[in-house]
Image (cartoon, coloured by chain):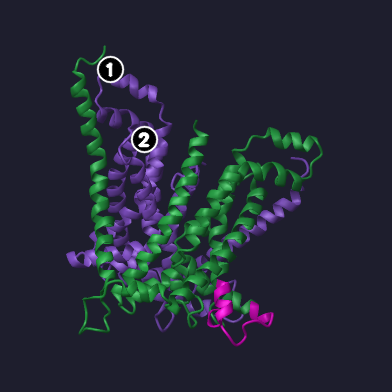
Chain colours: A purple, B green
Amino acid sequence: MSWRKPKLTTGLTAIVLTITVFPYAWILLASFKRHEDLFARPVKWIFNPTIENYVALYEKDFHQYLLNSVIVGFSSTLLCLVIGTLAAYCLSRYRIPAGQHLFFYILATRLGPPIAYALPMYLIFDRFGIANSHIGLILAHATFNLVLVVWMMKSFFDDVPREVEEAAILDGCGPFRVLFQIALPMTYAGLVAVAIFVLIFSWNELLFALILTGNENRTLTAMLPTLVGHPKGLWPQVAAASIVQTIPVLVFIFFIQKYLVRGLTFGAVKG
Amino acid sequence: MISNRSPILRISSEAIFQWVCIAPVLVFLIVVAVAPTAVAIVDSLRNLALTSFSQRGEFLGLDNYRELLGGDAKFFTALWHTVVFVLIVVPIEFAAGLAIALLLDREFKGRRLVITFVMVPTVIAPVVVALIWFLLFLPTFGILTQYMNELGLFRSTGVFSDPITAFGAIALIDIWEWTPFVTLLMLAGLSAMPKEPIEAATLDGASRWQILRHVQLPLLKSLIVIVLMLRTIDASKVFDTVFVLTGGGPGDSTEMLSTFAYRTNFMSWNLGYGAAICLVIAFASLVVAAAFYKIVSRQSERSTP
């Protein structure tokens, strides 16, 4: 559009990018700095990079926390994908008695503050002895991501043309075959995007992880704040750990950008 | 060929299918949401403070609720902080997010990459956001502290050691973290917008501001309502950054509802009273969720007639 001044908009875009990216870039630099380079006065922009921080993390059994995050992430994703997709398909195709209430209740579990749901879970998991295990956290992460699966998958199923399914039913297909051989393949891309979102939200989640895990099954995200309390200030290692935690997320986000709007609003807004 | 099975069989196979679909989610929700809530309700009526072993578990009736809503100063301070926090960050995030969306709403080289970079603050873990700003604002050695020192600021105090600046910094970080979210949604709305009204207004000689005010914003109205509601709901739940950066301090100057609930339960181990707090918060958010649900479902009805 001709009334825009191209130089001004390019300059403003550059400023916006600097503000959003600089803090992250700074911690990326910090992860390759030695302690004395990071804590230099005045600020050191040029320095001799090192990978010793990443090596130090590896030597500290950091991969155990990484593994915990992966176990919890994949198990909870699988769990809520299976039960959520079935429910979403049913809510999309049939008029279920009280279906609207169910749909709303699933949303409510996500809109409330996590602490209000984490504490009751802690109280009951503690009684069953799974308060300090992967199982409790997997259930918790599956719960608060259920809304994402149900709401997003319902919106994808709603977009599948009914005619295709009706033709299959006339050909004698039962409802199970219609779901697995027609509806699911047609929403495959959306299903993958939903899975990635659930994985990322589980990976990034702090509060449930803090409350429902002990030292040995702590996830990477819940372990990060504990590094800060260290008296010597392990900042270069904190930076390295933060980079390890965020790089997979950024890579995934680049590839599912098309679904970002739906994912961040759990399907309430179709981008 | 039409299926030769009897209608009764057909209906029952569909009924079975519906049960297979819905039963897992029902069982799951009963185990992880309904049963825990029931336990929490019972616990909220009891004295489960770690400090009082002699009367631990004693039934108190509604005493916990009476104490909480009848004037627990800490609770109302946390509530007040949360309200002020929401009222500061949400309007700023909305205005900045909309402005950036208008800036990026055009074709240019590398647009997809630029948007990915703009989204960095929103998609990385909130814990990492907190750690990044912790490092930037570190007393004496943080890069922002050093540059602010040169301007004569924070020479003797840290950003997080003064009540006002600590609160301001938490708000600033939230704005940094969530403005891109508003931008993304507004961009989606702007690019889905029909081009004709804007072109017509341009031909009529309308200014950029007039087009925004009288053409684009009215068309975005329903999306704006959703964005504002989502941000209000999420901002009122702020936890991770406060937990890492200030722990609610100094004093109680950055204590929010969720950190207050966390502290009562998992630092003071006052689980009965803590359960009452969580249930009150959950009930309040249920009301908000109902309003949100009404708006969203009304809109999807309109968009798919």
Percent of width and height locating residue B136: 55, 73
Residue B165: quadrant of the picture:
bottom right
**Residue of label 2:** A92
Residue A214 vs A187, above or below: the answer is below
Query: Is residue B157 found inside the magenta-colored segment of the image?
Result: yes
> A150 or B214, which lies in front?
B214
Question: In the visual, does A11 lie left or right of A201?
Answer: right
Mark seen at residue A171? 1
Q: Mark 2 lies on which chain?
A: A
Residue A243 in sight from this viewpoint: yes
Mark seen at residue A109? none
Query: Is residue A174 found inside the magenta-colored segment of the image?
Result: no
Q: Which amino acid does label 1 sit on?
A: Asp
Decide: few, some or many residues near mark 2? Use Cα within 10 Å; few <14, some 14-19, many ≥20.
Answer: many
Percent of width and height locating residue A110: 39, 55
Residue A212 vs B247, above or below: the answer is above
Percent of width and height locating residue B292: 47, 50
Q: Give the range drawn in magenta.
A: B148-169
Q: Residue at x 49, y 48 (%)?
A: A254
Q: What residue type is labelled 2?
A: Ser
